[in-house]
Amino acid sequence: MAVINGSSRENGNTDALTQKALDGIPYTSFYLKNYKINPIDDQRHVAGGFDKVYDDYEELIRQVLQYDVLIFATPIYWYGMSGAMKNFVDRFSQSLREEALNFKKSMSDKKAYVITVGGDHPRTKALPLIQQFQYIFDFLGTEFAGYLIGDANAPQEILSDTMSLENALTFNKALLKHTEK
């Protein structure tokens, strides 16, 4: 199980809720803020494909693809995923063109979850973010197995959100069932 964490702050609310949801489950975290992932020019329709980009994305995506369960954890930034997460997801276009990666087939064998945290009524206002991930996973053939939305803004505020903490326990039980298989 791999967590792709799009937060710009380790040990923030997204991280805390993710840790609660994964308590007792082995996983590897990839903090996108620790990787250099450059934006790319859209060359999907160029005969030669994408130009080589000298950053950490290619190695990171190869590591991520080794896992069968992916958790996309991102704070809600301006009613969407974080910039780091969006930049990472945008690079999927490049991965789709790389034949050796067999990206779409690899992603179709995976199960994905989303964990997101934000303030300003996130259980309603984060739904377009959840829908965006649903469309991404649908396109890739990835099973979208569930999501968790937390309500917090200030550091560690998530630990006072009893609804999110209860939902994290339910989320954890579902994930434990998957890991027992």
Image: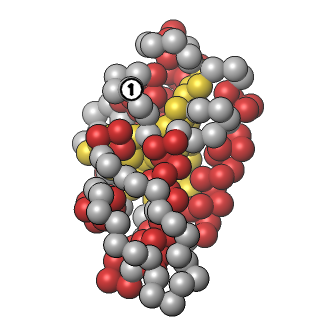
For this view, does 149 lie left or right of residue 22?
A: right
Q: Is residue 47 above or below residue 150?
A: below
Q: What residue is rendered at 46% in x and 82% in y?
A: 49
Residue 96 coordinates in the image, percent (x, y): 47, 76
Q: Is residue 148 above or below residue 150?
A: below
As drawn, the residue found furthest toward the right would be: 124
Q: Bin the neighbour count of mark 1 within 10 Å (Cα to Cα): few under 14, some 14-19, many 20 and up.
A: some
Instruction: Give 72 or 53, whichever is nearer the viewer.
Output: 53
Q: Is residue 142 above or below residue 145?
A: below
| Quadrant position of the C terminus in the picture | bottom left
Helix, strand or loop at mark 1: loop
Instruction: Give 89 or 65, whichever is nearer the viewer.
Output: 89
Q: What residue is rendered at 48% in x and 46% in y?
A: 85
> Which colour style is shown?
secondary structure
Instruction: Give 27 or 14, whichever is nearer the viewer.
Output: 14
Residue 79 falls in image quadrant: top right
User: Residue beneath label 1, please?
Assistant: 9
Residue 58 coordinates in the image, percent (x, y): 31, 64
Q: What residue is rendered at 54% in x and 84% in y?
A: 46
Residue 55 falls in image quadrant: bottom left
Amino acid identity at mark 1: Arg
